[in-house]
Image (cartoon, rainbow, N blue to C red):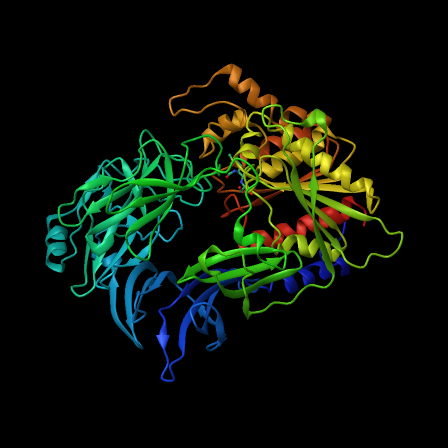
Amino acid sequence: CLSPGSRETINISKLYRELSLFPSLTRADVGPVITSQYGGKYSNIYTEWSQRDLERNENVKFCRQYIVFHDDKSVVYSGPSGNCTEIKGELLSKDSPSGDMKAVVRESIIKGEDKQFLEIWSKNIKVKSINLTALKKHGKVYEDDQFGCLVWSHSETHLLYVAERKRLKAESFFQSCSLADEEEGVKMGKEEETTKGEQFVFYEDWGETLVSKSSPVLCVLDIEGSNVSVLEGVPDNISPGQAFWAPSDTGVVFVGWWHEPFRLGLKYSPNRRSSLFYVDLTGGQCEQLSSGSSAVCSPKLSPDQCRIIYLECAVYGPHQQCSRLCMYDWYTKRTSVVVDVVLSECILFILTVCSPGGSWSLLTIERNLMVVSWSSPNCPPSLRVGFLPLGGSREEVDWVVLEDSQTQPDIDWQILNFTPPPEQDNSQYPGLDFDALLLKPKDVKEGVKLPLIVTPHGGPHSVIVADWLLSSSVLCRMGFAILLVNYRGSIGYGQDSILSLPGNVGTQDVKDVQFAVESVLRGGAFDEQKVAVAGGSHGGFVACHLIGQYPEFYKACVARNPVINLASMIGSTDIPDWCMVEAGYNYSTDCLPDPAVWEQMLNKSPIKHVKQVKTPVLLTLGEDDKRVPPKQGIEYYRALKALQVPVRLLWYPGNNHSLSKVDAESDGFMNIALWMTQHLSL
Ligand SMILES: CSCC[C@H](NC=O)C(=O)N[C@@H](CO)C(=O)O
């Protein structure tokens, strides 16, 4: 085993430090069109970035602005305006539509207590700073991308946001308060309504990454009067979010999620019963705008304020299944389907006309000006802008780079396509192919066979795209090849591929990955004795299946928060429906434990094959994971210990499912790299 101070360990940490310097783009906003004194038209582009700061042990957020001169169909001149500025304490921010003002929700610690403020900035002045905590109209403001929003009214006189409903201060049954205390409280204006007997009441939350978010309310600030009000009219059994102002500011449109009979995890789960609603500001009447038997998200008002587009999919079933794009006409109240569920091979037009190859991520589009983050497995994110070709023409977009990044010359990558052998074809969904991304060190000496790390993604309905991946690029620079497999069931290939997997987890996904690895090995460039597997969550499920079903094949395994036993997980995860659906059953909120279903869940789980495992396993677990509770990993750890299979468990307090806090991520990476080096005897 390499010691922490060995030259090799130091070199790996140096590489990690070097490659973790590249920031990623998290947001872009395009400002209004301004005409300069010389007649040229330009827009400001505001961007936010995130970068790991290993010294400070946190992800730092910073912004940079760019100026883009254009003629409405092409960029004429562009460049940065000033340097980067770190953003501290901002939970949410938004420029007003005219660009004249900016609103910020800020968190600040004052005398050891967390306080939230809503600030209004105009030119170089902070014109308002409203202490939301002191107002006590609601609890904490939601800053997440599930419910959260900060939206200017069209008139720029009001702001809309979402916060936790106000709760009365809970006191012990035995709390005594003297008359003198009460009188003092009243005198000081500090009296607070309290309630007895509620101190230990359980409040459901919305699960992984949304803990302590239970009952959101829509809040409006009247800027002129500095007055905050909580909107009335939202039904009691609905949690509102993703809100915006209706045409002419007559009310608010929002997505409402039903939270009865109980809340289920929402992260990566757009398949929760929900609908579009409109609440009228004058009468407080609430109207349901979409069907009550589906799941909706991401509503947007068209620039002409006449239509709302949104995504809609079925309730339950596979998480991240295909959605249809719907349009609601504000004036006729009619709904139409713009793009229906795509059954097979979904390739967006924009991706087909963009070169170079890699990953194009649209940050925003305003008046046909697209702002994108482009990256590839050997090139960290760069910022580009380009106009959408007019009238949907298939012309190439003329991309202009606003912020470039350095290509990593030592990394090579390619996309591989696989057709499963006939005996592995899915009879219900025949003829499905799948892809994989292969990363390799560039100049390999003649005769050298590379060690290979196989990585199935999680989900299972998610996807690996050809973007910049920090850990894969460091491993590649260390001399490993990495094979990232989009087995059948991944997203981006249409609904049929997604539906082919539920009921077949532990076989179809596992066989696809094994087929991909064996096909790649047949090429002769890789060392068959040096193959490892690593995956997180459902990717950890596939990894642990592979070492159980192919016990001689893999020389090392790493699993982050892996699903080990569907039957034991259903009672503790925030998404029990996932366990039922992936095991091949329908879910309903009133389903009770059924021995036959549990037996199938067990049969499809990695724990079923643990007796065959010989591969050394490194487990990385997040203490606060609500999705795959760490007890899943512990279950595997105990079984491996009993079988005397080498196992090492890393336990990360304060971390959830993603293990993405800077210290957990970097420590996890170093341990993974050393585990691979040790067991593949590099
Ligand atoms: C009951 S947990 C199911 C696995 C989990 N699915 C959704 O959250 C998963 O695999 N998550 C992926 C992301 O989709 C991960 O990498 O964490």
Residue in the foreground of this view, choosing between 557 and 354: 354
Locate residue 446, reporting x and y percent.
89, 55
Locate residue 118, reporting x and y percent.
28, 62
Residue ranking furthest to the right: 447
Residue located at (35% from left, 40% from top): 336
Residue 57 seen in render: no
Residue located at (62% from left, 52% from top): 466
Locate residue 36, reporting x and y percent.
37, 81
Reply above or below: 122 against 582: below
Residue located at (53% from left, 65% from top): 383
Residue ranking furthest to the bottom: 38
Reply above or below: 244 against 54: above
In this picture, residue 479 sits left or right of residue 349: right
Residue in the foreground of this view, choosing between 223 and 278: 278
Identify the image quadrant of residue 518: top right
Locate residue 480, reporting x and y percent.
75, 51
Residue in the foreground of this view, choosing between 230 and 674: 230
Q: How many marks?
A: 0
Residue 98 seen in render: yes
In this picture, residue 285 sits left or right of residue 14: left
